[in-house]
Amino acid sequence: MAIKENIEAIKDELSTQEQFLEGMIKGERFFKKYKFLFIALIVLGVVALIGFYALKFVEQNRVENTNLAYSKILENSNDQNAIELLKKDAPSLYALVKFKEFQDKNDTSSIQTLLNENIDPALKQIFSAYTGNASGEILGDYDTLLKGYKLLKDNKISEANIEFSKIPQDSALISIVKNLQHYQGNK
């Protein structure tokens, strides 16, 4: 009986080794069949990682350079190299510098020219509001709120309510509008 069990154990062991060897051969065939695809995916992954970190490095370098240029402008507003760098790499920051300069001179026509620059839309709305052309979602609602508040102060409540009705219900200012309508500007 022991010999029979030993023979069965040897057969099972050989069967397991055959299955392992068969699996290895199938794996090798699969790898040979798709070898170029695997290599291409690995190369693509490495290139993507290198590209990602290179872009991150370039962006960080650009931000540091524009911050340095902005610092130089704060120290010396006539530094043309720093101004040109800001104009090229950070047009919104350049527009803010120019806005401050034009604001100090009270030059609204020059501020109007900043509206034609390729800058952040929120900055355009701020510049537009400063020049008296309050339009846009952000500052338009705020301007309407101020007009309504002024009408409340002049005790023109019905006109103020008409002005307040121009502000959309989903505006961030709607809670202030409701309070002003309720208290009629008294509190």
Image (cartoon, rainbow, N blue to C red):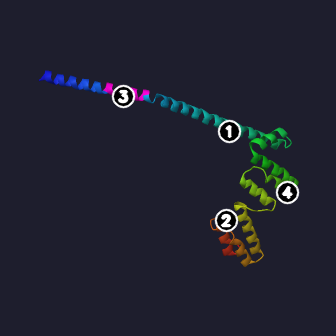
Would you place residue 72 above or below residue 108 in this image? Answer: above
Label 1, residues with CA under 10 Å away: few <14, some 14-19, many ≥20:
few
User: What residue did someone put label 1 on?
Assistant: 59
Question: In terms of depth relative to the viewer, which is nearer, 160 or 111?
Answer: 111
**Residue furthest toward the left?**
1
Identify the residue shown where x is 76% and y is 39%. Answer: 68
Residue 103 located left or right of residue 184 = right
Residue 104 located left or right of residue 13 = right
Of the two numbered discs 3 and 2 in the rendering, the one whose residue sits closer to the viewer = 3
Q: Earlier in the sequence, mark 4 or mark 3?
A: 3
Q: Earlier in the sequence, mark 4 or mark 2?
A: 4
Question: How many numbered markers are drawn?
Answer: 4
Q: Amino acid at mark 1?
A: Glu
The magenta stretch is 20-32
- Spatial CA span between label 4 and label 3: 77 Å
Q: Earlier in the sequence, mark 3 or mark 2?
A: 3
Q: Secondary structure at mark 4?
A: helix
Numbered badge on residue 108: 4
Q: Earlier in the sequence, mark 1 or mark 4?
A: 1
Would you place residue 170 above or below residue 67 in this image? Answer: below
Q: Amino acid at mark 4?
A: Thr
Q: Secondary structure at mark 1?
A: helix
- Are the residues at dot 1 and dot 3 in contact (C-beta closer than 8 Å)? no
Q: Position of residue 71 (x, y in %)?
A: 78, 41
Identify the residue shown where x is 28% and y is 25%. Answer: 18
User: What residue did someone put label 3 on?
Assistant: 26
Of the two numbered discs 1 and 3 in the rendering, the one whose residue sits closer to the viewer = 3
